[in-house]
Amino acid sequence: MTRRTIGQLTAVSIGAAMLAACGGPGAPLGPPSPKDILAKPLHANLKDAHFLVTGKFAEQGVSVDLAGDGELVYKAPGAGRFKFQTMVAGQKISYEDISIGGKDYTLSDPGTGKWTSRATTSGLGPGSFSGVSDFKYVGEENLAKGKAWHATAKDKDGNGFEGWIRESDGYPLKYLIAQQSNALTLTFDRFNAGVTISPPPAAQVVQG
C-alpha cells in the first residue's frame, strides 16, 4: 500500500468521523418523540401483557396500601382488567374492574356480590396509556427488563401519567398513575401469554 493510498484512507476516516460528530448520516439517531414513545405498545408485536399493581389510596385523610395485578389485551378492540386488595380498619377489601367493548364492569367485596356495568369512553385498555396532551420526554433508564424510554403525558380526562417503554421492542415496562393523593404503579412482568378478557356473566351484572 502506497503512502498516498494510506493518506487517502486516513482522510476518508477523518471525514466520516467529522460527519458523525456533526450529526451526519453516520450519527446515532436520538429518541423518538414522547408521543411516539407512548404509542409504541399499540404498534408493537404485542398481543397481551400482565402487570403487578402497587400503590396508595387516600380518602378523608386515611391512606392505605394497595396490591394486586391486571392484564391488558392489545388485539382489537382491546380490553383491560385489574384487581387489587387492601386492609381498612382490619377488614380486607377488594376491588376488580373489567373494561371491554365500551363498558366498565366493577365488583367490590364487601358488596352486593354483583358486577356494576357502566358505559365509558375512558376504560382501562391499551389506549389508556398512549396520552393525548402534554407529552414530555424525560430520558433513558435501565430497568430490570431492559433499557427504556421514559415519557409523560395526560390522558383524555386530563390525568397525568408516566410510561417506561422498552427500546428494543416497544413493550411497556412500567406506568405510574398519580391523581391527587392517589398513586398506582403498574409493573409489567409477562407478555403474549394468550390472555383473553371477557365480560362477567349477564346474570351477575346490574346497571350502574
Image (cartoon, rainbow, N blue to C red):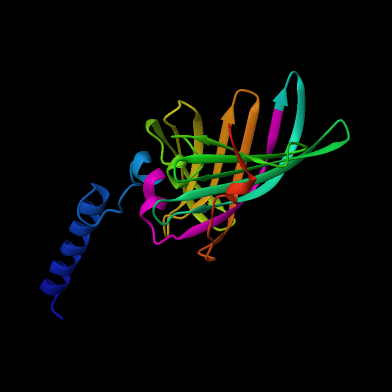
Q: Quadrant of residue 158?
A: top left
Q: Is residue 53 magenta?
A: yes
x%, y% of residue 97?
Answer: 60, 42
- Residue in the picture at 17% in, 72% down: 6
In this rendered view, identify the residue nearer to me: 56 or 112. Answer: 112
Q: Quadrant of residue 178?
A: top right
Q: Quadrant of the N terminus?
A: bottom left
Work out whether 192 lies above or below 67: below
Direction right: furthest residue: 90
In this rendered view, identify the residue nearer to me: 91 or 108. Answer: 108
Callout count: 0
Q: Quadrant of residue 45?
A: bottom left
x%, y% of residue 70?
Answer: 61, 50
199 relative to 76 in the view: left or right: right
x%, y% of residue 20?
Answer: 25, 53
Q: Quadrant of the C terminus?
A: top right
Stretch in magenta:
38-57
Direction bottom: furthest residue: 1
In this rendered view, identify the residue nearer to me: 168 or 38. Answer: 38
Q: Is residue 16 magenta?
A: no
76 relative to 94 in the view: left or right: left
Direction top: furthest residue: 60
Direction left: furthest residue: 4
Work out whether 131 lies above or below 200: above
- Residue in the picture at 49% in, 40% down: 103
